[in-house]
Image: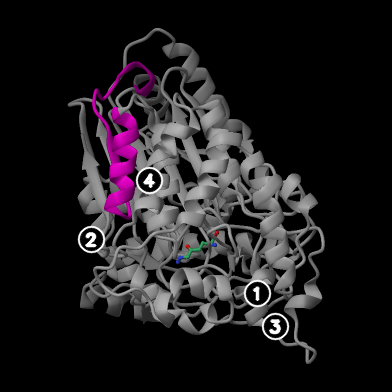
Amino acid sequence: MNFPLNWRVLSLSLLLVGGTALAADGTPKAAATAHSASMQQRPGHAAIASANFLATNAGLEVLAKGGNAFDAAIAVASTLSVVEPESSGIGGGFMAVLHRAKDGHDVFIDAREAAPAAVNRKDYINPDGSPNRDAALKGPLSAGIPGEPAGLVLIAKRYGRLPLQQSLAPAIRIARDGFQPDARLRGSIAAEQKTLERWPASVAKYLPNGKPPAEGVIWRDPDQARTWELIAAHGDDGFYHGETAQKLVAAVRAAGGNWTLADLASYQAKERTPITVNYHGYRIVTAPPPSSGGVAIAEILNILSGIDLTKMDQAQRVHYIVEAMRRAFRDHNDYLGDPDFVKMPLDMLLSPFYADGLRQGILPDKATPSSMLPRAEAPEPGMHTTHFSIIDADGNMAAVTSTVNYTMGSTFVAEGTGVLLNDEMDDFALVPNKPNVYGLLGSAANAPEPGKRMLSSMSPSIVIGADRTAVIGSPGGSTIITQVLEGILHFIDGESAQQIAAHKRFHHQYLPDEVMVEDGTFDPATSEALTKMGYTLKQRESWGFMNVVTWDRKTNKLDAASDPRRPSGLGKVQ
Ligand code: DON
């Protein structure tokens, strides 16, 4: 982190040792105070918000057995793998920000997929030089080495209270006994039917009788149940070595992929230091590389911190936020990648002085065109990937965003494992200067290399103010970053969990140079004012599925909300 912010927080933390919590006064002082307060107080009850009611209930079940927020996170993630495989799961990866109440320890869990050692850019380029989008998005070549099992094992070992057998029990039970696939899962299978049909194990799992499961059928996944059981019994070895690893490698290679047993054996989930940024008295703890989310959110907040948004009309406010987004996404394209492979100028990108310079370049009444790179066309992403948020009765917090990337990942199931593989390789800059499925352009920093983790937009975040805390995140490809940013700003404006999850959204990612807007976000006068400033507004249908929990530490009230755009979500306080 940059020197000035750290120094302010550190010096104020020292002043506050043993001190009482002060009221928020809009300075970084309040943020340091808030952090101390969050360590001292307990909510006494718990809140979980996830995209699926079976997953939220699995988390609550594990809390009731004496688990903490981290055990509950394992239960929620593994259950989502069973009941919502189109979005995240055992064959994918996740990123999480955890806050441990007893000592205030914040940590980022990097369970991002990694490229296999035999990765070869040529596999993603057609003979005529055009990008091979099919190889990037479907089948075993599109899959990175999964991170989810290793990440959950790491969380259980270092942060959980219960053995994995207990925290994985709900997922194993649901996979064995069965559940009724909801409309979204049935729709995702139908949408991907053509590609699923290419792989016999995918057909066996998702297209019983050659068709997507019908409404009301009970659906079981004994192979996945067994794989989770092996993980429960043997930890990492249950997936990355032995029977499961052998089946995964055999299936991938038989279908034209290039994984080896060594790729699986060498995979490790990693603990990293989260990015922390102070904004208007709140401390935001968020995702570092290999996510681009935290860097972008910090850069945007640093730019906005020198502007009084509260005194502006909606068009002015949106103008400054969009200009900050534009600049952060340009840097995202140019600099960011896996920190174990690339040197990134993070001190610069996170510095308030750098943000000062960027802010000065924003014209008060005109859009700045993003003309430095060729325009990229971003298709509408299917809303897959999932985020859940948890606060337990001790004040532990987990913000977890988990994914198999695009709808149903690679659509490839490795026979005999119940593992649907991700298609995360498309998050690399596979072909120079060609956009990925989210319209993101990448540079050498995000080029594929053996063992490297592809850049992500996942931005699980915890926002800690003097009296209020939020755990927040969303799916949505590149729009994750801006949706989480807007959620953070709405929380700081005083909105409730429900209001934050429901709030209308907008997005700008440098290229394409347009503001993507949800219907109803701007009133006609704002749209007109923005158009006059030079913005191209483009309506977009699909927006993320935010799951937020908040804790008002003054009144000790917990709240949980799932995005109303998604009826199957469930936020619950217990
Ligand atoms: O890691 C990433 O940024 C993407 N693989 C996330 C994918 C996603 O959010 C899909 N949902 N729209």
Q: Residue 468 at what x, y percent from top left? A: 28, 33
For the residue pair 225 and 80, the one nearer the viewer reads as 225
Query: Looking at the image, is mark 1 or mark 3 nearer the viewer?
Result: 1
Q: Residue 228 at what x, y percent from top left? A: 51, 46
Query: In the image, is 265 to the left or to the right of 332?
Result: right
Task: Report how many numbered discs are placed on residues in the image.
Answer: 4
If you read the primary sequence from the N terminus, does the residue marked by circle 1 or circle 4 appear first? 1
Which amino acid does the dot numbered 4 rest on? Arg
Give the labeled residue for mark 3. 131
If you read the primary sequence from the N terminus, does the residue marked by circle 3 or circle 4 appear first? 3
* Residue depicted at x 56% and y 28%: 157
* Residue depicted at x 28% and y 43%: 57
Tell me the distance, in whole angstroms, between the alpha carbons under discs 1 and 2.
Answer: 32 Å
Q: Disc 2 on helix, strand or loop?
A: loop
Above or below, comparing residue 55 to residue 523 in the picture: above
Q: Which residues are magenta?
A: 38-64
Q: Are marks 4 and 2 in contact (CB under 8 Å)?
A: no
Tell me the distance, in whole angstroms, between the alpha carbons under discs 1 and 4.
Answer: 34 Å
Tell me the distance, in whole angstroms, between the alpha carbons under discs 2 and 3.
Answer: 37 Å
Q: Disc 4 on helix, strand or loop?
A: helix
If you read the primary sequence from the N terminus, does the residue marked by circle 2 or circle 3 appear first? 3
Give the labeled residue for mark 1. 136
Give the labeled residue for mark 2. 564
If you read the primary sequence from the N terminus, does the residue marked by circle 1 or circle 2 appear first? 1
Q: Disc 1 on helix, strand or loop?
A: helix
For the residue pair 82 and 269, the one nearer the viewer reads as 82
Crowd around label 2: few <14 · some 14–19 · many ≥20 (10 Å): some
Q: Are marks 3 and 4 in contact (CB under 8 Å)?
A: no
Q: Residue 258 at what x, y percent from top left? A: 77, 66
